[in-house]
Amino acid sequence: MLDFDLAEIYGTSTKALKQSIRRNIERFPEDFMFELTNDEYNELKMRLRSQIVTSNEYTRRGGIRYAPFAFTALGVVMLPNVLQSKKAIDTSVLIVRAFNAMANVILNPPPVNDVKELQNEVMELKQQIKESFADYNDINEDVQMRLDNIDQRLSVANIQFGEIYQALIDLADPKKEFEKPRKQIGYLSSKE
């Protein structure tokens, strides 16, 4: 996602967002965020100029003055931790709660028959995330596409969660042997 999209989502200006990032640049390595190249930036400017409706951010003084930052999924998760807006703080709290819930499930796995209940909880969490973004913004098509992408990723994660859970159950089963029996070493008696 680009910096101006995230600024709108988190209820702050692009300038304030970029300042917060520059003050905390060590929190954003290359796999979290990068600045667009000149070619990418020029392509973006052309697309923005060709749109019928553009934000004041783009049209003021001839468009975007500096190349925007692009954020990966990891950067989007880190960003609320450095922003001071109410929306960013609320999002950060939701992220921490989600990770805490995942850690609790991993450390205290429920019985196998409770997996369906966990899947329902994941679906409820996904719905809460959608509702949170809907409360903060009039979701435009671009943001809706991104939410659909999150929905697809959560569905994949839900399937992977079931596989991980089954692997944990298999590892916890004391009846399963994972190592080959070792050949006994030392002196052999004549009977052997």
Image (cartoon, helix red, strand yellow):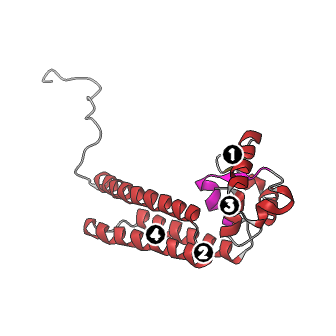
Question: Would you say 75 lies left or right of 155 here?
Answer: right
Q: Badge 1: few (under 14), some or many (20 or more) residues near its Cα, within 10 Å? A: few
Which amino acid, by three-letter code, is at mark 4? Lys
Numbered circle sitting on residue 30: 1
Question: Cβ–Cβ below 8 Å for labels 3 and 4?
Answer: no
The residue range painted magenta reads 67-80
Q: Is residue 165 above or below residue 105?
A: above
Is label 2 in a helix, a strand or a loop?
Answer: loop
Q: Is residue 149 above or below residue 132?
A: above
**Residue drawn at x 33%, y 53% as measured from the top left:** 163
Which amino acid, by three-letter code, is at mark 1? Glu
Nearer to us of marks 2 and 3 is 3
**Residue 178 image offset from top left, x and y in percent:** 29, 42
Question: Cβ–Cβ below 8 Å for labels 1 and 3?
Answer: no
Nearer to us of marks 4 and 2 is 2
Q: Badge 2: few (under 14), some or many (20 or more) residues near its Cα, within 10 Å? A: few
Location of residue 116 by image quarter: bottom left
Which amino acid, by three-letter code, is at mark 3? Ile
**Residue drawn at x 67%, y 71% as measured from the top left:** 88
Numbered circle sitting on residue 19: none
**Residue 63 image offset from top left, x and y in percent:** 80, 56
Residue position marked by numbered label 3 in the rendering: 52
- Quarter in which the C terminus is drawn: top left
Is label 3 in a helix, a strand or a loop?
Answer: loop
Which amino acid, by three-letter code, is at mark 2? Asp
Numbered circle sitting on residue 138: 2
